[in-house]
Image (tube, helix red, strand yellow):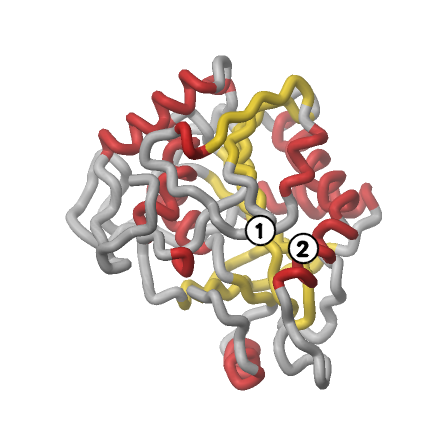
Amino acid sequence: MNGPASAPWNRFPPALHDVRAAAAALRSALPGSEAARIGVVLGSGLGGFTRSLDAAACVPTTRLPGFPVARVEGHAGEVVFGRCADVPVLVLRGRTHLYEGWSPREVVLPVRALIACGVERILVTNAAGGIDPTFGVGDLMLIEDHLNLTGANPLAGPDEPGLGPRFPDMSRAYDPELGEAVVEAAGEAGVTLRRGVYAGLAGPSYETPAEIRMLRTVGAHAVGMSTVLEVIAARHMGARVCGVSCISNAAAGSVPGAVLTHDEVKETTSRFGGGFVEVLAGTLARWARTGVSDVRE
């Protein structure tokens, strides 16, 4: 399966045995990883967080059956196991996207594998364009909700009761309690934290000014090309989710004459990465103090 999908995007979701096989391979490649109850997904240019982990070990996703291979700069394509604030964590260092040709079922398989390994809380991160004019480059945004505008859903296809319910509730896709830990950690670190709605689009082209005006009208505060499918799959399997965006640029049309590039995104996340790492570490430490063995919904 380690190649771009040739079938349409609305392929069936992964069978339970595929998820279990990926999880078994992950546990075998990273001994002790079954102790992790917290998972982290790192977005474009945010992979530096793994350097803060103690006793870290990693495995390339090319060695894990069913895992799609990241082919975008800023996404290393590794799974890392280590300790943050003395808490074992599993980290997806880089992700794959619909625009690379992967199907929804392939995009979300890594997150499903983490949950099948025992992860119960997931912190998803991304680099995003700021739609809200009050947002500054380098700000963080706590994702309070999302708009799935990708035209895809990883749950489409036959029902898979072993993975989760047919019609999972998304009214609390992003857990408010977990989010409050981000607020506290950002305050302690002195990092500006906004709150808002993340719009997930398929990409890979950046949005037009007209599209940004539309997104602002429907209530979006930031926009990107990832995250929403992973969150749907995670909630489908009963994991609790928290999301944080790093505002890497002003959205199209916000700055007259500005040209958006992926290099700008990587440069911004690299420049503000120290504050991002501090907020993530503080968040996970707070999660650890409240316990990680929650009963899944």
SS for callout 2: helix
Residue, x 47% and y 45% (percent of image)?
Answer: 70
Label number found at residue 73: 1
Residue at left 56%, top 49%? 243
Query: Which of the pair 250/155 is nearer the observer?
Result: 250
Q: Specify the farthest residue to the left.
A: 158
Q: From the image, tell me which residue sits under label 2.
A: 266
- The answer to whether residue 123 of the structure is visible from this angle is no
Q: How many marks?
A: 2
Residue 228, by quadrant, is bottom left
Mark 2 or mark 1: which comes first in sequence? 1
- Residue situated furthest top in the rendering: 31
Dots 2, 1 in contact, CB < 8 A: yes
Q: CA distance from mark 2 to mark 1?
A: 8 Å
Q: Nearer the viewer, mark 2 or mark 1?
A: 1
Residue 283 location (% of width, % of height): 67, 37
At label 2, counting other C-alpha atoms closer than 10 Å, the crowd grade (few under 14, some 14-19, many 20 or more) is: some
